[in-house]
Amino acid sequence: MRVLQREATVAGPGFSRWLVPPAAISVHMCIGEVYGFSVFNVPLTQAGAGWTIPQIGWVYSIALAMLGMSAALFGKWVERSGPRKTMVLSCLCFCGGLLISAAAVKLRSLWLLYLGYGVIGGIGLGLGYISPVSTLMKWFPDRPGMASGMAIMGFGGGALIGAPLGVKLMDHFKSDTSVGVAEAFAVMAVLYAISMLFGAVLIRVPADSWKPPGFAAPAGVDSRGGGKSVGVDMAWRTWQFWCLWVVLCMNVTAGIGILGQASRMCSDMFGVSAAVGGGFAGLLSLFNMGGRFFWSSISDYTGRKTVYSIYFVLAAVLYCLVPWAQNIQSRGLFVVITAVIISMYGGGFATIPAYLRDLFGPDQVGAIHGRLITSWSVAALLGPSLVNYISTARIRAGVPRAEAYHSTMYLMAGLLLIGLFANLLVRPVDLKFVTAKTRHE
Amino acid sequence: MNKPLKILLIVCVWIAVLLPLAWGVYQSVLNSLPLFVGPSTVEKSGV
């Protein structure tokens, strides 16, 4: 269809670039629902199919693995096809995946659930995650950090919407014969399709010659010759790419270690009820979302390398203070420390596309970002496993439950120092990697 | 499109996407309340 082609989305004169961030947010706040999937875990075990929590847990893991894989595999296609076609395909996969999941619950087929939410929905996640980010940065060459922060903040916000929406829909459709999961999936598919298609209609790419009024490209990548960038196949052969891979992996590992276990950790360390632990997890989600916009916007003024150095040094110090906060039983201090750490975790996600743009140029930043996201998949396995494994081993060794997390905190601080080292190694990419004209190749 | 109409369109589009986000933030704040109003006397669950 012509209307989906990149050429059909080139903005005419007079188009306001401030219409593009809502397009990106409307997609990201839908696919961010995946973070809230855990609200379906228990209801799915009660759906009458005899499914267990570990079996349901695989749905989320498959979806996140497919997110990383599809972003890495289809990144080049995304850059070539343009954002509208990708956003529509993302919508078809993600919302189609939800509908298949609804059918899976009705048919009591676990494999269909894996295929629907995990594989097909996961592909939708990967496509939807990278497609609007590079477009936004092309519209905001003067504020690329803020631009990517706006989109990726939407992803963090998606978790805040998806979880309560799922709970309310299940409550609404619950009956004597149904736990309401299938109906909730179906309604969410329709609501999310409306939002994602709204974004696809709204999205535009700037004309090749477009620049914001009064903008002069700073010395560096973009000014190396309008349109000259490092291609994705060349980018991942540079050591700078792998430095950033380690930077993101360490940042995410350290953050997700806390975020994934927040409720239990708070209960164990301070002996609070599950409700208070849940409140703590809710608060962290807010800081995760806010940090995505705040820190990435700050990076436009400080530079990407500086802001990541701040993340790593400050977060490492704060991690070392967590055991102290527990020892003096200061719940307030613990909350403040972890909230700042999680804001920087979110900031790390949101700043990385702008960092890639600085190093490799704007043309294939979406595809390069897609390949870098594989570090997220690795970190998503590493972080929670480290916290779980070490704390469980310490408790078995006779350490009081409240103190079982101390060594994990020091380990996380160590991982952040590895990230700091990788960040300090980053230097501008050698001009021999710059391709003559990579746009739309 | 004249300028006031363009600004109105931008504002409407932003409101359309920020409303669900604001609802999500509100829900999250509601979920966080037990952290601040929860019992300060803790019930130790440790070893």
Image: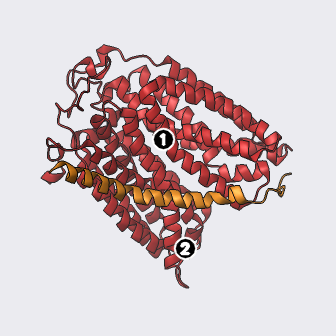
Chain colours: A red, B orange
Q: Quadrant of residue A211?
A: top left
Judge from the rendering whether residue A286 lies leftward or rightward of residue A354; answer left or right. Answer: right
Residue A159 horizontal/vertical position (percent): 50, 55
Crowd around label 2: few <14 · some 14–19 · many ≥20 (10 Å):
some
Residue A292: assigned label? 1
Residue A213: assigned label? none
| Front residue of this view, candidates A64 and A280 | A280
Query: Residue at coordinates 55% horizontally, 43% vertically from top-left?
Result: A380
Residue A49: assigned label? 2
Most extreme residue toward the bottom, as rendered? A176
Residue A78 horizontal/vertical position (percent): 28, 42
- Could you tell me the amino acid type at mark 2? Ala
Foreground label between 1 and 2: 1
Q: What is the C-alpha distance between the residues marked 1 and 2?
A: 39 Å
* CB under 8 Å between discs 1 and 2: no
Most extreme residue toward the front, as rendered? B4
Residue A68 horizontal/vertical position (percent): 43, 43
Q: Chain of mark 1?
A: A
Callout 2: helix, strand or loop? loop
Judge from the rendering whether residue A327 lies leftward or rightward of residue A246; answer left or right. Answer: right
Query: Residue at coordinates 71% horizontally, 37% vertically from top-left?
Result: A408
